[in-house]
Amino acid sequence: RLAQVAAIDRDALPVQNEIVQVNDVVRSVLPLARAAAERRGARTVTDLEPGLPRVVADRARLAEALTLFATDAAATAGPTVPLMIAKERAGPRAIIRIAPVSPVAKSSAQTERATVSNTENQPSLPGTAALLFASRLVAAQGGEVAVDRDGLILRVGRK
């Protein structure tokens, strides 16, 4: 994964941008997210806004990033903490919120392009490379990843 992060930083990872319906991409990763949550005894709560704008993104890479973030969140969910996935409109962009946020996601989510050295101080944290990769996949498509008190925030689509 770190090699793929380096490829993204060198602009050597091909991105196939196309007009994407965000709801379709989220629906495609829901079965994996639900299965991961069920293994933890958690339920999955979704709030899918039907009228989200279409955005320019790489469908496959966006789905890969969402899967990594959702399965990470599912690992933190449990019988009393559901996995939550919600989407909302943000002008020409879409926002996808995922909760709960794992400690690994909190430490690796960046609002700006991160450097690989950010994870060198945390080699014992499982999943750090995968979440860094997911963040970079979103950034490579013109999106952003951040964390607030309500969860992980993915802004997808170009400004």
Image: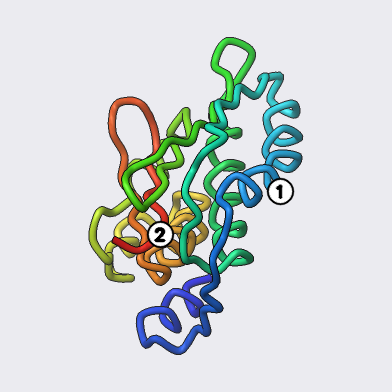
Q: Amino acid at mark 2?
A: Gly
Q: Indicate the quadrant containing the C terminus: top left, top right, bottom left or bottom right.
A: bottom left
85 vs 9, nearest the viewer: 85
- At horizontal 56% and vertical 78% (from top left) the residue drawn is 16
Label of residue 134 in the image: none
Label 2 vs label 1: CA separation?
Answer: 18 Å
Q: Secondary structure at mark 1?
A: helix
Label 1 Cα neighbours within 10 Å, binned few <14 / some 14-19 / many ≥20: some
Label 2 Cα neighbours within 10 Å, binned few <14 / some 14-19 / many ≥20: many
18 vs 141, nearest the viewer: 18
111 vs 81, nearest the viewer: 111
Rendering coords of residue 55 (x, y %): 47, 59
- At horizontal 35% and vertical 26% (from top left) the residue drawn is 150
Q: Is residue 98 above or below residue 13?
A: above
Residue that sits furthest to the top in the current view: 80
Name the residue tied to disc 1: 28
Q: Secondary structure at mark 2?
A: loop
- At horizontal 54% and vertical 16% (from top left) the residue drawn is 81
Name the residue tied to disc 2: 157
- At horizontal 45% and vertical 89% (from top left) the residue drawn is 12
Q: Amino acid at mark 1?
A: Ser
Assess whether mark 1 and mark 2 are in contact (beta carbons under 8 angstroms).
no
Rendering coords of residue 7 (x, y %): 45, 84
Rendering coords of residue 34 (x, y %): 71, 32
Q: How is the image coloured?
A: rainbow
Q: Is residue 44 above or below residue 154?
A: above
Give the total of numbered labels: 2
Q: Is residue 136 above or below residue 124?
A: below
